[in-house]
Every structure is written in structure tokens, then in C-alpha cells.
Amino acid sequence: MSGDTFLTELGYKLGKTIGEGSYSKVKVGSSKKYRENVAIKVVDRKKAPPDFVNKFLPRELAILRGIKHPHIVQVYEFIEVCNGKLYIVMEQAATDLLQLIQHRGHIPCNEARHFFSQIACAVKYLHEHDIVHRDLKCENILLTEEMQVKITDFGFGKKIHGYPDLSSTYCGSAAYAPPEVLMGVPYDPKKYDIWSLGIILYVIVTGCMPFDDSNISKLPKSQQKGVVYPDSIQLEDKCQTLIRELLQFCPSGRPAANQIVKHIWLRDNKWPCNMSGSKLLAQLGYKLGKTIGEGSYSKVKEAISKKYNKNVAIKVVDRKKVPKDFASKFLPRELAILRGIKHPHIVHVYEFIEVRNGKVYIVMELVSTNLLQLIQQRTCVSCQEAKCLFSQITKAIKYLHERDIVHRDLKCENILLTEQMQVKLADFGFGRKSRGYPELSTTYCGSAAYSPPEVLLGVPYDPKKYDIWSMGVILYVIVTGYMPFNDSSISKLPEKQLMGVIYPEEIMLEEKCQSLIEKLLTFSPPMRPTANQVTRHAWFRERK
């Protein structure tokens, strides 16, 4: 029986490959048993060298069977097939630390502390159980939708028998390896992990590697000189101190994992609760100004930033004043999405600041107006301008949907516009990470005027198709200056949506523009196009 057939009988369906190692592949899998998507690592013993099959693989399996920690990837089961294949079924993560850093450039200290404290706790747990990883790197630090750390890939892990149980195997990645490993001398594997933690922390807060590893033979000399920070990065002294301690050239000078978790930089996890919001922000170089927006549970204020040398927008959320459902469900989703995305047509977030008194400050780029205000000033927008604006909106939605992120509150007020008329999509309060089709949503959210019929009727819905419908409403509003349907009676709104749109007599629209609106506002969700198809619509290709 083939491996795929065997997995099907066990309730798994293999999907695309999401990772590949020297002797294994990791695939997405849907699971009837666990009712969620999983990651399945596939190892073919017949294609791997004897050293891997007889030494490293048994060690990895033994470690994975014996550990359980909130910041280490959870393994559900091991499936061995007589044809030599081994399947390791694990929880699926949303992304990894390397991808996040590639998106963001570098992570501000407050966020870096959030990630690194979780990594350090996981390594402390391993070392207390005399387990070493020996391949800690940003690619092996997975992140969930809620931006929770999950350490993975124990291919070079081993169980040690206390000090001085030295290792002699050269393993891991040169860029994350300590000098004693590169020089080929027996080494303390726990101190190997500590050095790798130093590299990871440096990469998180700077966005670049601390040492040039293009010539491995010269790398130990560079490591001995110590790290240099980019001129553009301003780091807290305590953070620099921790990096210096982790990257001590002499292994015995590096702290133990249990000392790292108690480091003063990690203890400064949140600002004191007795400090007012304005005083805290002043210490960080911000001066709050007027309120420029207000939602159900938050306010957005203009602020002057010394740090970024420009005016910014600061969204203020008070966890203590919001409903429990918002604080425990929607706010963590929004923060996780904003931490993981970067696109020219999505509002850019500079940093997140959390205070012990429950307040969260999200520092974002300041944008001058929004699409609704533009339309109110202009009544309607010409087809050429509409095409320019809507193509930017479409590209942002395509980017989100390709990453299985849905917005679920697209409306003209949430389409910000810069002075150069560049679109910046904002407000991910109802956003969420979906796990691919057919994961349906049941939460009624967003604005009725922009909601599709299936949401108004209270049936489970495809959240991506929700976004597509909202795009149709937005495009209609842009080119006509009116809403397509009268939403004064929400109970009657689905009937009007079923009848289709009618255009004002005074508005002359291109046929291809009308065609796109009608496709987006198709009553049946499966008949609506995907975001990718929208970007390739004939209307966009006709530029004058």
C-alpha cells in the first residue's frame, strides 16, 4: 500500500509541500481525526544515508516522543510504513521567524522581547531535561497565527548525560554555529544552543546577520572581534548587554538558559501600570495630539514621533474596557495579522506597546484621508481614477488571501489614502487567518451595507468570498457615489441583493467596469471570482 493511500485510510489528505530538508519533506495535510490542518513530515529511510537512519533519526523521534511544552511544536502521532517511509504528524504553524523578519526588516525591542522570551523558555525546558537542539535558527522558530513561538526540527537534537558530556559532531548551520564548533574542537552542546540564541536575538532586532559567513574558515576571527550594530538601529542597552553575553567567544562565559530567562531585559516585559499613557509615550519619544478616528473599542490619535522623525497615528485599545470576546479573540488576531504582513497598500505598523494596566498602543503610519471622505468631496470618481484606486485595493486583498488572511470589514472608511492617492488598507479588527477552503466562518461581523447575503442570512460563509462581495460594493460606491443597496431594513437587504444592482441614470460606466461589479456582487458565493482573478480582469488591462 502506498503511503498516500495509507494516510487517506487514517483520515489524512496530503497537500502542498511547505518545507524541505536534506532527507525529508514537510507537507500540509488536512485531518479528519483532529479536525484541522496539520503539518506532516515525510522521511524516506531508503533514500537517507545510514548515519542519518541509524543515529540522528532515532534521536529525533525519541526527543519528540518525550517532550511537551507550549513553545515547542506539538507532535500528534508517528506513522511508520513497511516501505520505509515515516510520517510525523504535527501542529501546523502560520509562518516562521525568518519570514516575519524578511517582511518587517527588523523587529522593535518590545516585540523582540515577546518572541525571545518564549524561545528562551523553550530552550530552558529542553536543557533542564538534558536535551540539546544544535540547530536553532530563525527558520526553525515557527510562529502561530497568534504569534506564539513553536521550536521545531530536532534533526540534530540529542539527549546528553550531564556535564562534561562533550560533542564532536559538526552539525547545524555555520551562520548560527559557535567558534568552537567551527574550529572542530569538542564542545558543550548546551553552550552551542546559547550561542545560537545570541545570533537569533541579533537577527530579530537588526534584521541582518551579525557575522559574514561567506568564508567559514575566517568566521571564528570575526566572532572573536564581537558584533557591530547597524547605524540605523537604536537598541536598548540591556538588549545589547544580553546579546554580548550570549555571544561570548569563550563557551564558559556564556550564561545558562535558566539565567537567560531571568535577564533584566526580559523582565522589562511591559511598562509599569502606574505610569499614565501619555507619560509612557513621552518616554518613548511620542507626543499625542488630537483624536482622528474612533471605533467601538478604540481611538486613533495623531502623534509626533522623535524616533521616526515624522507624524504617526497611534491606535489606543484598553483591554479592561472592551468585551471579553474582543479582548481574548479579535484583538489577538488583529495584532498577529499586523505583525506578520507587509505590503505597499496595507497600512504600515512601526511598533506595538503593551502596558500592564491593559492598554495597547499600535503605532502606525499617518495617512491624510480615506476613500469615503474623497467620495463625499467629489461625489463620484472618474473611471480612470477608479481603476487606479481599485487596482491597489485588489492587490492588497490578493496579497492577504494568498496568505489565507481575510479582512471581513472592507469598506470605504477603512481604505486610507495618502497625499499621493496611494491606497493603505486599515483596520483588521475582524481579520483572521483561515486555514484554507473549506473553512467556513459563522461570526457575523463587519458593516451590513458591505456584507454579502450569506452573512446577513446567518449561514456559515466563506470569508474570502465575503471580502470579494465587499470589494464589489466599494467599486460601485467609487464610480457612482452611491451605495448599491438600501440598507435601512437589514432583514429585506438580501432580497434587494438578489435582484442585482441598478446604476443611476446620470452615471455612464464602461461596460467592463459594470461587468466586474456584477461579478463581484454575484448572489451565489462560489460564482464570485477570487482576488487573483479580479487582478487579471479585462477592465484593468484597458489603460488610457
Image (cartoon, grey):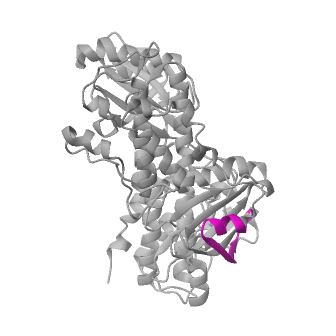
| Residue at x 24%, y 26% (from the top left corner) | 184
Q: Percent x, y for residue 294?
A: 71, 71
Identify the image quadrant of residue 174.
Answer: top left
Tell which of 224 and 134 is nearer to you.
224
Q: Quadrant of the C terminus?
A: bottom left
Instruction: Decide whether residue 533 is among the magenta residues.
Output: no
| Residue at x 52%, y 87% (from the top left corner) | 507
| Residue at x 59%, y 31% (from the top left corner) | 70
Identify the image quadrant of residue 19.
Answer: top left
The total of numbered circles placed on residues is 0
Tell which of 64 and 486 is nearer to you.
64
Magenta residue span: 278-297
Tell which of 544 and 353 is nearer to you.
353
Q: Percent x, y for residue 470?
A: 57, 65
Q: Percent x, y for residue 89?
A: 46, 24
Do we see residue 277 in this rendering? yes
Q: Percent x, y for residue 134?
A: 38, 28
Left or right: residue 540 versus residue 280 is left
Left or right: residue 67 versus residue 22 is right
